[in-house]
Amino acid sequence: MLFSYNWLQSFFTGRLPAPKKLAELLTVRSFEVEEVKRTGGPARISVRAPLTERSVAGKDWVLDINVTPNRGTDCLSHLGIARECGASAKLKMKNEKIKIKEEKTISVDNFINVNVNNSSDCPRYTGRVLVGVKVSSSPKYIQERLRACELEPINNIVDAANYVMLELGQPLHAFDLDKIEDQKIFIRRAKIKEKVDALDDKTYKLDKDNLVIADSKKVLAIAGIKGGKSTAIDKKTKNIFLESANFDSVLIRASSQKLGLKTDASLRFEHGMDPNLTELAVDRLAQLIQETAGPHCYAKRCRRACPQSLRSSAGRRAGGKIAKGRIDIYPKKTLSRKLKLDLGKIEGLLEIKIREKEAVRILNSLGLETKADLTVKIPTWRPDLAQNEDFAEEIGRIYGYEKLESSYPTLALIPAKRNDDIFWEDKIKDSLKEAGFSEAYNYSFISKRIGDMIGAGLVELKNPFSEEFYYLRPSLILNLFENIQYNIRNFSAEKNIKIFEIGKIFKQEKGEIVEKKMLSGVMAGGPESFYMLKGIIDSLFENIGVSDYYFDEYQATPEETSFNFWDRHRMAEIKIGGREIGFLGALNFPALLKGGKVQEVFAFDIDFEVLLEECSEESEYRPISKFPAAGRDISLLLPEDARVSEVLNIINASENKYIKDVDLFDFYEGSELPEGKKSLAFHIIFQAENRTLSGREIEAIMAKIIQDLENNLDWEVRKSA
């Protein structure tokens, strides 16, 4: 918002800092000054001249000040900014009283009657009547100051209203009194399809959400926003009614937005105005008009109320007259508040020792009244001050934040209680990143095309952004698959691309939306990628303390949909203690691809919430045996549908305490073997904790294992020739 430097100077006898210095001071003490620019030609500023005669003669500096929203009540005015300037520069402001001369022989009640339908919409309505005014151009100092604030002068009546608004912050409006029907004004909500021809030459359609000023026949103005043409001030205007009102800020904002009409008045009302300012503002406006808008005779309509002396030639030379009294409808008064200044708390918050006298001086310089017992009277134009913390801010900024010494906090730093979900999630992420995976953060949506293929159970958005974000994702793998295809197209095919994500999926079950947190990963590569991914899962589970896990044959379930992105012939179930927690295998996405040859992709999909239940930091440590281990190999000829797990189960079923590990090290299928057969070779490690095993003991254990394996009639243990 723009403020005139000369205008600000007029509030003081002492000299303000130079414009640019003042801008720097305000920036560190009050509000950011975004720009300082010069206007007009050379001239001198007389600080001793009266306020209304202070000459700017075309020379001025304009400060563009970014007033914060919490200070809109008092600082969207030159008076408010001047108060900040005085407090920051330690200058005392002038105490100029508003003096108006009322015509005791005529009363405002003889000219106008006002009715406020709802005091919530209009908490206060104040008005004055002036008669016998003469409409002409404004004095030069008013025109210059208006232009400095980018308002174009119109005539002395309208300019005076705009001038006082910029000076005190209270929006005002002047009506041609003779154009008001039946001498009655109503503050009410607009009727449906009601219209008003506004001063900006536009017609606005109104409804019940708009507050209006009306007479008995028509709308005169949109309350708090824009005046109407029907009662506009023109050269023939003789008698005027001055409006100074307080309107509900929320209502004015909503009305302004609905009409698409922003004005200087609506801006101020939206921030919330002090209802106690209306009286001061209307008196100041009446004073200014009386000084600049006379002489003229009265209109015929008020002759019955005016004595003969006022209609004489002497009366006409006397200029505009202010009718005695005001219209003032103020049913529920807003009172100033009182708060005890707690200097100890202020010092604790600012961490400085500040003298009581200095704290009181700062608060008083900002317009507050502090008594000897440190009770502070907070004016109604400072609704942002409610507690001692607010006093600390006011004292601190005017005292100077740059004077505050920096110090380390003295409070004990207590670490937050560990969140197990976050702890294990970070540990899982670290484990996968160490295995060469990159983490992905995808949107929680899938496209309409993919969603329609999946079918039932999806959660459709009520207001989709586009067809690419149409459903909530039922699986992390859908988006991860697209991620990996994008990377395959943009990177070398030989590059081992591995991506994982932890996030929520969404499904519709029994009419309710069910959320579940999942851990999923994808990997591009050949058939060996399945075993690599299995090894990564082994390493992950080992790092997070999961022990009782195994990979089982995939079994189809009745609840599966017709759409399944797994290759059912190359997948396994991941189980912990007999409980299924996820899947591992190859993906089969022909329906999701738009054509083209694609590298094979393998994935794992794990219920993250169930996995967390199995995580453990407990570890069992055993001393390393001092005695050597011995190994034996065993090769089997099996039917091609036999599973490795079946062989391992039989070997481990012997429960021999000397068997430390069993590994599959060879797998072969070929024409050299009988039809329908395959060859598996295992390496078995034996070790005792307290002695060296003899060859005879190991052979006895191997004989027992061979006997158990050959109990399956289709299995043959191959012996060397």
Image: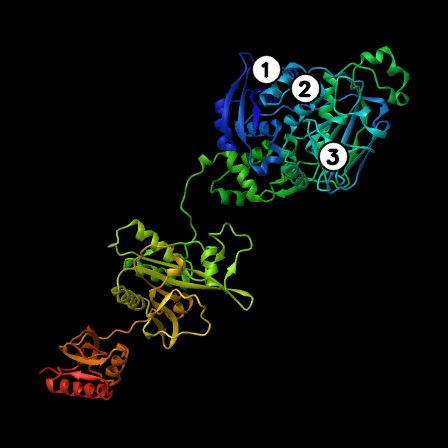
Name the residue rendered at 25%, 83% in the picture: 650
Work out which quarter of the rendered image holds the N terminus and state it: top right
- Measured as percent of width and height from the top left, residue 450 is found at 44, 58
**Could you tell me the amino acid type at mark 2?**
Ile
Asked if residue 129 lies left or right of residue 69, the reply is right
Name the residue nearer the viewer: 325 or 438. 438
Sequence-wise, which precedes: disc 3 or disc 2?
2
Reply above or below: 1 against 651: above
**Residue 482 falls in which quadrant of the image?**
bottom left
Label 1 sits on a secondary structure element that is loop
- Measured as percent of width and height from the top left, residue 367 is found at 62, 33
Label 3 sits on a secondary structure element that is strand
**Could you tell me the amino acid type at mark 3?**
Lys
Reply above or below: 718 against 314: below
Q: CA distance from mark 3 to mark 2?
A: 25 Å
Asked if residue 42 lies left or right of residue 560, the reply is right
Name the residue rendered at 49%, 26% in the picture: 35
Sequence-wise, which precedes: disc 1 or disc 2?
1
Q: CA distance from mark 3 to mark 1?
A: 42 Å
Q: Look at mark 1 in the image and give the residue it sits on.
A: 56
**Residue 619 falls in which quadrant of the image?**
bottom left
Q: Look at mark 3 in the image and give the residue it sits on.
A: 195
Task: For the residues labelled 3 and 2, say whether their Cβ atoms are less than 8 Å apart.
Answer: no
Label 2 sits on a secondary structure element that is loop
Q: Nearer the viewer, mark 3 or mark 1?
A: 3
* Mark 1 burial class by Cα count in 10 Å: few <14, some 14-19, many 20+: many
Q: Look at mark 2 in the image and give the residue it sits on.
A: 154
**Could you tell me the amino acid type at mark 1?**
Val
Reply above or below: 40 against 341: above
Name the residue nearer the viewer: 551 or 1. 551
Q: CA distance from mark 1 to mark 2?
A: 19 Å
- Measured as percent of width and height from the top left, residue 261 is found at 64, 33
